[in-house]
Image (cartoon, rainbow, N blue to C red):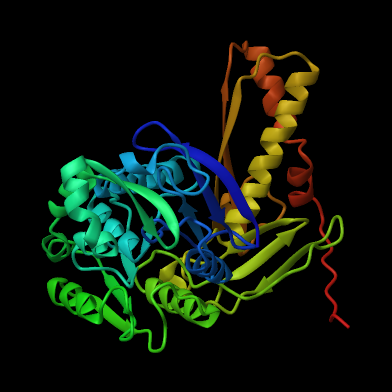
Amino acid sequence: MPTEKFQFPGSDGQLLAASLDLPDGAPVAYALFAHCFTCGQNVLAAKRIAEGLAKHGIATLRFDFTGIGASEGEFANTTFSSNIADLVLAADHLRKTQRAPSILIGHSLGGAAILAAASLIPEAKCIATVAAPSDPSHVTHLFKDSIPEIREKGELEVSLAGRPFRIKREFLDDIAEHRLTDTVAKLHKPLLIFHSPTDDYVGIDNATRLFVAAKHPKSFISLTGADHLLTQKRDAVYVADMIAAWAMRFLDAAPATDVVIPNPAAGVVMVSETGASKLQNMIAAGKHRVLADEPLEVGGLDTGPGPYDFLLGALGACTSMTMRLYAERKSIPLVRTTVSLQHSRVHAKDCEDCETKEGMISRIERTIAMEGDLDSEQRAKLMEIADKCPVHRTLTSEIAIVTRTAE
């Protein structure tokens, strides 16, 4: 499964390092992941959960907050509010480059941050938290003995997980202002809470408070035997599997499929049922993969164009390409071609130019819009060329379809 590496600007203008874990086929949904306090995007829990979601067709963006990992900026200048702002900007980057995240996931303090950011990401359909505190200030217990000195001096270097971090008084003041249970009570989005009853860092009572505060639909899954950081691979994989299964109930997408179609030979198109629904199929042409489906009202899941949509699309694309090649060759100032097509079944007797005079026949109406400073002669010639596109000729000539059983 591919992983794209890139950067995007954070809340203070510094570049944040990010990874987008992608499924092998077209994503059925996008997720945004917020990692734990002082962790990075490559912490095992985040990496394994993202990889697990990719197997279910869900693309996941994980990134280093300001001053963490490969991201620019100073950790000492960050606050809980700036983390929320970074999450909103991460969602905005996805919105601009791919598709806005419909699933929000947060681990530990990242869970608290993702809950606080949820209302600022309108496309989010559901939220999952793992070992999240019900009060963001819970994180201060990691350096509680240093809090008086931080308040006195304004800034102090503390050791967290064996690494030095500078904590400022502003961080303490900011995190104390957030009332997460009040935010959760107004969430109005499906919430799935994961927590281990043996979590030594964030007690299970935090999950109880979040669950009680949340409105339905809400769910809780106990991570029996798991530690706070989900260091056992099986725990992270389990979380990914459960999120994928749960989230599909709230997404406008079909469940992902495990079907894998190898790259067909040149000139060969392969189509295979995915098993995700009654009618969904995967079309493979070279390295490209696209879903074919039918609308909900006829038993499909509406996850892709229907067979006739692809037929019309093939004719429209061929028409536009043929006109473009001719315009380039003849130096015709064609700026853009837009082809609109519609298929219907009509009575043969209503078609004056058709050889068939009985029963029903297929009718394709094609409307071509041409942009550019074109005279009437150029427009007429381009319309003439449109009828010469290879797909048009195929559809209007005798076609022999030979079908045989695969060996």
Quarter of the image for residue 21 reads: bottom right
- Residue drawn where x is 64% and y is 19% of the image: 334
Quarter of the image for residue 191 reads: bottom left
Q: Position of residue 169 (x, y in %)?
A: 20, 44
Q: How many labels does the image show?
A: 0
> In the rendered image, is residue 146 in sight?
yes
Of residues 125 and 73, the one nearer the viewer is 73
Q: Which residue lies furthest to the bottom in this view?
A: 224
Quarter of the image for residue 127 reads: bottom left
Left or right of 18 on screen, residue 325? right
Q: Where is residue 147 in the image (x, y as percent from the top left)?
A: 20, 54
Of residues 222 and 202, the one nearer the viewer is 202
- Residue drawn where x is 13% and y is 61% of the image: 186
- Residue drawn where x is 54% and y is 71% of the image: 52
> In the rendered image, is residue 174 in sight?
no
Q: Check the picture and name the quadrant holding the C terminus.
A: bottom right
Q: Where is residue 223 in the image (x, y as percent from the top left)?
A: 38, 84
Q: Check the picture and name the quadrant holding the N terminus.
A: bottom right
